[in-house]
Amino acid sequence: MGKSTTINGRPLKPATLMMGHGFDPTLSEGSLKPPIFLTSTFAFPSAAEGKRHFEGITGKRPGGADGLVYSRFNAPNQEILEDRLAIWDGAESALSFSSGMTAICVLMLTYCSQGDVIVHSGPLYAASEGFVAKWLSKFGIRYLDFPAGAAREEIATVLEQAKAMAAEAGGKVAMIYLESPANPTNALVDVEAVKAARDDVLDPDCPIAIDNTFLGPLWARPLDQGADIVVYSLTKYVGGHSDLVAGSIAGATRWMTPVRMLRNTMGGICDPNTAWMLLRSLETVELRMQRAGENAAKVCAWLQGHPKVAGLGYLGMISDPCQQDIYRRHCKGAGSTFSLLLKGGEAECFRFLDALRIAKLAVSLGGTETLASHPASMTHLSVPDARKAELGISDNLVRISIGIEDADDLIADFEQALEAV
Ligand SMILES: *Cc1c(COP(=O)(O)O)cnc(C)c1O
């Protein structure tokens, strides 16, 4: 497979590599685009090679399989996808999954054992938080969390507590799991501070994983700030058309190999059709995210001064100096997902949402179309009121994901919807 990523020593940019990296048309009848390989199994050229492949799959020989064996382990469309995903984050390798949640669950199951403690930033995507609190606890794995905006000393204190808690149960601190920005508050996690605290308190065998779904791959590259593993729901910006569900993780091969072993056992790899769709999506991910980001900046600039607007949780308009400092060190753009605080409560938000004509009333984010939802009564309905208040999920908060429509049309839509409030 074509792997050249430079020309005359010049490293090629991801936007260029998305068109052909990892695929050699001459191996597929000259087909310019990869065919979809609908097969469950792959013929071995010889029995000896079949044996060698299985030595790689089972871990008898390090380095993984050097050929294709069976589609639960890997297949051409998924391998091309994984090669291209790794490029965006500057990772050594990537693994694809059937959903973001499959990626997250398989990752956590790989690294956590009985008696271990996970430390995570809060809040997390509700299903991620639920997996830790409800399912991992069944196996004697406990957790501690710290708020997304926490400083180094506060993080170090929580890591010390986690270390003591794990020692008492005969385990270890197995993973630091982050999500930045937090949803729907948009609070950023200081990954550099987390890494410094980890290096002070724990040994480097405790990986730092981070869910980069909201800002990746264009606006944040957390591996550059010291995270070890980056996690995606590809369903959002990467897939980008609200027409598929998939996930991935990426990082150094040493972190990926154990996860690959569990994926080989459990399954959960992305299917070939979805992988092919994602290859198409990756060709335009930079264009789409740039346009969505520009649109969001225009829409927020307009919303900011509106008399019915009480506030905006948009990374392009941070007022807190500590958050602004993290933004400057970690982000290349403000994204296109933000929260809009209306004057009033649920009734005003519902009138606004029901009046929208271009923006669709739906959860999810990162698609070509603009979406709006009401977290307090939808995605976060089951969160207890006290926790909602702590997280800033108020009744007057609308979550908006801006798409790639015409920005002035979007502004006109928000204008008439605000009139209806
Ligand atoms: C959507 C989402 C997930 C879960 O991804 P699925 O593809 O729906 O399984 C995880 N984390 C974040 C931040 C998300 O937005």
Image: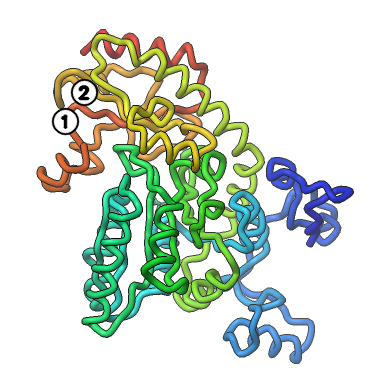
The residue sitting at 38% across, 71% down in the picture is 202
Residue on which the image places disc 1: 395
Please state, as top left, top right, bottom left or bottom right, where the C terminus lies in the image: top left
The image quadrant that residue 416 belongs to is top left
Residue on which the image places disc 2: 349
Q: Is residue 123 above or below residue 414?
A: below
Q: Is mark 1 within 8 Å of ligand 1?
A: no
Mark 2 burial class by Cα count in 10 Å: few <14, some 14-19, many 20+: many
Please state, as top left, top right, bottom left or bottom right, where the N terminus lies in the image: bottom right
Front residue (pair 301, 289) = 301
The image quadrant that residue 282 belongs to is top right
Residues at discs 2 and 1 in contact (Cβ within 8 Å): yes
Q: Is residue 419 above or below residue 269?
A: above
Q: Earlier in the sequence, mark 2 or mark 1?
A: 2
Mark 1 burial class by Cα count in 10 Å: few <14, some 14-19, many 20+: many
The image quadrant that residue 27 belongs to is bottom right
